[in-house]
Image: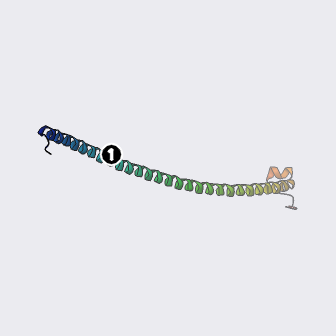
Amino acid sequence: MIWPFTTIAKLRNELRVTQGDLRLAEGHLKALMTEVTDAADRHTKVLGTKQRLLDALKQELETTRSALTIVKNDLTWRKAQLSLSQKALIKAQKALAKAQKNDTAKDAKTGKFTKKVTNV
């Protein structure tokens, strides 16, 4: 069978247009694949950054908890020291009150103790 010249020309033209469309579609496909790859890379970087931030926050939280524990222990120790100091102060005040019972009015003026100390 012999094809007419115009039909062959039309078919060649359609083939050329179809090949151009195919090249254009391949270009779009390559661009989309590149965009998908770039988007995946960006997503991976974002996830990595997010993970590093979470790790840093966890470490900061542990540091803060440790510091809080140290401060609580220090506060407990200081409360114990304050309690001991208050007990010592009360004891000293009682001893002073006993010592003042042995003083006379004359002793307060002269600064000399004339009575002997008893039960101090």
Quadrant in which residue 84 is drawn: bottom right
Q: Residue at x 68, y 58 (%)?
A: 77
Q: Position of residue 97 (x, y in %)?
A: 83, 53
Tell me if residue 112 can be seen: no
Quadrant in which residue 116 is drawn: bottom right
Left or right: 11 in relation to 58 = left
Q: How many marks?
A: 1
Left or right: 104 in relation to 56 = right
Q: From this viewpoint, which residue is outermost toward the left? A: 5
> Against 45, is 6 above or below?
above
Q: Residue at x 58, y 55 (%)?
A: 67
Circle 1 residue: 32
- For badge 1, the amino acid type reads Leu
Q: Position of residue 55 (x, y in %)?
A: 50, 55
Q: Nearer the viewer, residue 119 or 14?
A: 14
Q: Position of residue 8 (x, y in %)?
A: 15, 41
